[in-house]
Amino acid sequence: QRIAAIRNEDARFGRRRDRSPLACRSVFRSAAKLWPKAPWVQLETDEKVTYPGYFGEAFHGTPRAHLTTSSKAPRGVGTPLFPINLVEAILRDHAGRVRRGSWLTSKLRRCLNQHLAFYAAWRNWVLPRFNRDEHAPGVLAGMAPRNLAMGEFLGWRQVWGRLSPCPFGNGARSVDDPLECPLAAELRLA
């Protein structure tokens, strides 16, 4: 039934372009910009053959290690790909637009990107990784001094772009000021 539905959609709208190479390159470049002076970088992925090239391109000149695991290997707690699969499962659970077989699916890539950017910011700056943690991933990675309160996060307006006040600051400096705002590097990626 699923294959028939895909064929029907292809017949009505044409084949969907494969944007995977562009997306992968963008992710690796964004990761490299987040910590440009990293002393070394370790990447853990499945065995997709294009990852080493994108990794080397984005982190050229940085000492790096790339550990791979077969996607056909047994899955479960304690396996190398478990953290990646868990994060994807949590994303599908929390963000209805990426849930498989859901009517909530975004019709436009722009809308999906906006939704995922909001979700990523919420996960990185507000929500602790697990119930046992006190801090959000952005704090644990040393990129923020503290978790944002829900009100700070939802009340943060960026109507002035890079001149918008930093949510971690006192409101006197913009998000573009790296001394005031730990988000400055991340926001420059947009």
Image: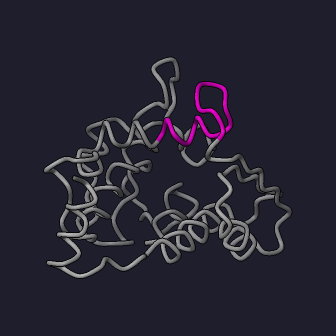
Q: Residue furthest top?
A: 132
Residue 118 in the image, given as x and y percentages of width and height: 32, 53
Residue 88 lies, with reference to residue 114, above or below; the image says: above
Residue 18 coordinates in the image, percent (x, y): 42, 76
Residue at 43% of width from left, 63% of height from top? Answer: 175
- Residue 82, by quadrant, is top right
* Number of marks present in the image shown: 0
Residue 160 vs 121, above or below: the answer is: below
Nearer-the-camera pick, 111 or 38: 111
Q: Position of residue 126 (x, y in %)?
A: 39, 38
Most common SS among magenta residues: loop
**Is residue 82 part of the magenta span, yes or no?**
yes
Residue at 14% x, 78% y: name it: 12
Q: Describe the colour scheme in one phrase.
A: one colour
Looking at the image, residue 139 sits to the left or right of residue 4; the answer is right
Residue 77, percent across and down? Answer: 60, 24
Please give left or right for residue 90 compared with residue 2 in the image.
right
Find out whether residue 90 is within the magenta segment.
Answer: no
Residue 153 placement: quadrant: top left
Closer to the camera, 89 or 2?
Answer: 2
Q: Quadrant of the C terminus?
A: bottom left
Q: Residue at x 52, y 57 (%)?
A: 180
In the figure, 20 relative to 157: above or below?
A: below
- At 68% from the left and 56% from the top, the residue drawn is 47
Q: Which residues are magenta?
A: 73-87
